[in-house]
């Protein structure tokens, strides 16, 4: 067997730019596990994925899984949009460009984290 591919430096450092800020913040939250998956950072509580953010610094669309009630409230903000594929499962998207976007995102991430810790936002047996 040959030598395996080297880990990208951005992964070793825990991301770059907004991803690094987000990873450093969420890593301090209880029971959060952060792992790279399919070109995005995946944020888990146990086995429940509650958010993901792109690995690439050029991309800025944060995906967050909310309860139905929180999703409706979040979509009242013009800067938050339904997820292009998974909106029926409670997912929303918002762009994280700067500090003010990060603060808004953290408010929704706290709600998503709490829902995941309670047992999964909008999760049914068929979603698993």
Image (tube, rainbow, N blue to C red):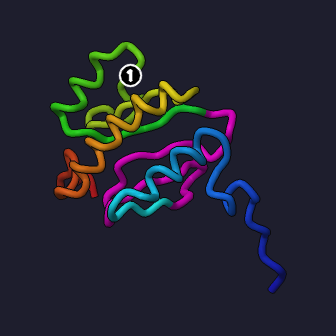
Looking at the picture, tell me which residue is in the foreground, 96 or 53: 96
Give the structural element (helix, strand or loop) at label 1: strand
Residue 52 highlighted magenta (yes or no): yes
Q: Residue furthest bottom?
A: 1
Q: Quadrant of the C terminus?
A: bottom left
Residue 75, picture quadrant:
top left
In the rendered view, tell whether residue 98 sits above or below residue 109: above
Residue 37, picture quadrant:
bottom right
Please state the extent of the stretch shown in magenta in the rendering.
35-59
In the rendered view, tell whether residue 117 sits above or below residue 97: below
Apparent side of residue 24 relative to residue 104 in the rendered image (left or right) = right
Looking at the picture, tell me which residue is in the foreground, 27 or 94: 27
Residue 69, image x, y percentages: 16, 31
Apparent side of residue 102 relative to residue 98 in the rendered image (left or right) = left
Residue at left 46%, top 58%? Answer: 27
Q: What residue would you read off at disc 1?
A: 81
Apparent side of residue 29 relative to residue 72 in the rendered image (left or right) = right
Residue at left 42%, top 29%? Answer: 84
Q: Quadrant of the N terminus?
A: bottom right
Residue at left 27%, top 16%? Answer: 76
Pointer 1 local density, CA inside 10 Å: few below 14, some 14–19, many at least 20 = some
Residue at left 57%, top 32%? Answer: 60
């Amino acid at each position: 067997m040959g030598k395996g591919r080297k880990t990208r430096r951005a992964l070793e450092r825990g991301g770059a730019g907004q991803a690094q800020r987000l990873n450093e913040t969420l890593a301090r939250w209880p029971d959060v596990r952060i792992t790279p998956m399919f070109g995005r950072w995946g944020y888990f509580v146990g086995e429940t994925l509650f958010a993901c953010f792109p690995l690439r610094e050029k991309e800025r669309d944060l995906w967050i899984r909310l309860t139905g009630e929180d999703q409706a409230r979040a979509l009242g903000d013009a800067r938050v949009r339904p997820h292009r594929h998974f909106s029926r499962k409670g997912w929303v998207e918002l762009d994280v460009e700067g500090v003010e976007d990060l603060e808004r995102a953290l408010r929704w991430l706290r709600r998503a984290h709490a829902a995941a810790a309670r047992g999964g936002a909008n999760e049914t047996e068929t979603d698993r």
